[in-house]
């Protein structure tokens, strides 16, 4: 008996674009796809469980292959981050912590929970899983306006056929049009690798114990108390960016399985100097960052990373009287070299005719309509809603012509604080590395940057 899928795969496996990506994935991109599928096996049980608990088909697991190659640290030129490629504002709108110390877009578990909730909301909005996937990639505003624009042509078409019918129009961007065929091709080859001449191994599942540690706890100390390597702790906790837990918060940390029982005793036995990761000092007259760095056994670059707002005199010396945050050498060496999570990049010029409202928890469509001096019916029409059903994090076009311009999801940050918008803001123009490698069609993919 052959494999089965809980998404529509067999129905579309013979379409031209699906066949094309099957050839690409099992041909010129074979080794890269095999490596990414193998990496995914570490997270597969967790992701499938999250999909199932969230009311989504488990095989939407393969969406993370297309998004990031299952890389929790994937980073695109558009500043989308993590396995599910959230932009900063979208991640925060979906309940993820994103700041200088912690970036939960990199957390495999929490980001998957957020992605499931987001995709489910899109499916509820459009009534189609593949339209939801297209909206995840290109923004729900664009998909909704396409359905509205071609409503007459699409009459009588339903379910997953709607995506393919809309994709035939010269409307969706190439990346979005190719997104679902890639998902289907990935699901095909992953469940029948031998049929396509592919082979990949299975990694140990992403399993762990958890414990809460105090503020400013070095990952190196956690590793010692867990009888693990620093790299093992970092791999379990990619969301901890600076080699140390935040200085003002206690934090839940993942430990290797079996380490939690003895952790508290082992941690308490560590020297205090090992358990402390950060301290502050006051800059003195004539001091330079190099002098402070050398004295404390860290690089000037590391000190600058932890103190981005330090003021200097024209001579280059520090302004006296400033607080300088100094990491220990163990903390500095365990820090991740990542850009500031507050960075977001947006492609294209801003639109003067379209604005987007990001739905907050507790809001209703009628309340939003009243706020923007319009009607519920008009909002439903502009956004292609079949029912007055909305969800937190959803982007709604609230002003301007529904059939013109670009959704504010692709516009300036000042004009749109959009969850899906900012998440996929530059995704129409910028392409993530894993996805770029997955697709191997450079002319179609300019979304995500190499890691």
Image (tube, rainbow, N blue to C red):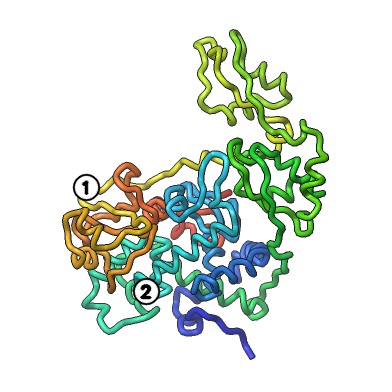
Name the residue nearer the viewer: 22 or 84: 84
Q: Secondary structure at mark 2?
A: helix
In the rendering, which numbered label is found on residue 22? none
From mark 2 to mark 1, how far is it between C-alphas? 29 Å
Q: Which residue is tagged 2? A: 163
- For residue 112, side relative to residue 418 (left or right): right
Q: Which residue is tagged 1? A: 352
Q: Label 1 crowding class (10 Å Cα cut-off): few <14, some 14-19, many 20+?
A: few
Name the residue nearer the viewer: 132 or 221: 221
Q: Is residue 168 at least partly visible in the picture?
A: yes
- For residue 309, side relative to residue 300 (left or right): left
- For residue 95, side relative to residue 27 (left or right): left
Q: Secondary structure at mark 1?
A: loop
Name the residue nearer the viewer: 29 or 229: 229
- Residue 23 place in picture, x, y as percent: 55, 73
For residue 43, what is the image quadrant?
bottom right
Is residue 145 depicted above or below 432 in this figure?
below
Q: Label 2 crowding class (10 Å Cα cut-off): few <14, some 14-19, many 20+?
A: many
- Residue 175 place in picture, x, y as percent: 42, 62
Residue at image position (38%, 64%) is 135
- Residue 445 place in picture, x, y as percent: 46, 58
């Amino acid at each position: 008996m052959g494999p089965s899928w809980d998404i529509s795969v067999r129905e579309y496996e013979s379409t031209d674009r699906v066949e094309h990506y099957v050839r690409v994935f099992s041909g010129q991109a074979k080794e890269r796809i095999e490596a990414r599928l193998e990496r995914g096996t570490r997270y597969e049980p967790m992701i499938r469980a999250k999909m199932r608990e969230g009311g989504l088909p488990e095989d939407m697991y393969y969406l993370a292959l297309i998004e990031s190659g299952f890389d929790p640290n994937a980073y695109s030129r558009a500043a989308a981050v993590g396995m599910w490629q959230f932009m900063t504002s979208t991640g925060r709108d979906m309940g993820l912590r994103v700041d200088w110390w912690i970036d939960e877009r990199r957390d495999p578990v929490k980001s998957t929970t957020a992605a499931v909730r987001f995709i489910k909301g899109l499916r509820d909005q459009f009534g189609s899983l593949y339209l939801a996937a297209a909206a995840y990639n290109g923004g729900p505003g664009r998909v909704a306006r396409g359905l509205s624009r071609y409503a007459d042509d699409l009459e009588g078409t339903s379910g997953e056929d709607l995506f393919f019918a809309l994709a035939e129009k010269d409307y969706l961007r190439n990346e979005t049009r190719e997104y679902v065929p890639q998902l289907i091709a990935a699901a095909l080859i992953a469940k029948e690798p031998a049929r396509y001449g592919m082979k990949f191994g299975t990694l140990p599942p992403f399993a762990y114990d958890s414990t809460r540690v105090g503020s400013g706890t070095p990952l190196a100390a956690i590793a010692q108390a867990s009888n693990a390597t620093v790299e093992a702790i970092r791999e379990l906790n990619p969301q901890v960016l600076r080699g140390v837990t935040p200085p003002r918060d206690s934090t839940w940390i993942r430990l290797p399985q079996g380490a939690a029982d003895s952790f508290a005793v082992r941690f308490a036995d560590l020297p205090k100097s090992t358990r402390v990761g950060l301290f502050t000092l006051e800059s003195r007259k004539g001091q330079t960052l190099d002098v402070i760095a050398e004295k404390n056994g860290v690089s000037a670059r590391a000190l600058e990373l932890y103190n981005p707002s330090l003021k200097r005199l024209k001579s280059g010396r520090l302004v006296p009287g400033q607080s300088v945050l100094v990491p220990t050498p163990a903390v500095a060496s365990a820090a991740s070299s990542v850009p500031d999570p507050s960075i977001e990049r947006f492609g294209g010029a801003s639109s003067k005719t379209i604005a987007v409202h990001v739905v907050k928890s507790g809001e209703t469509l009628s309340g939003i309509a009243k706020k923007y001096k319009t009607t519920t019916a008009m909002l439903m029409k502009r956004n292609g809603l079949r029912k007055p059903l909305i969800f937190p994090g959803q982007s709604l076009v609230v002003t301007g012509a529904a059939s013109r311009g670009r959704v504010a999801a692709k516009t300036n940050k000042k004009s749109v604080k959009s969850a899906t918008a900012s998440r996929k803001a530059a995704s129409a123009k910028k392409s993530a590395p894993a996805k770029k490698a997955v697709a191997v069609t450079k002319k179609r993919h300019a979304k995500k940057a190499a890691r």
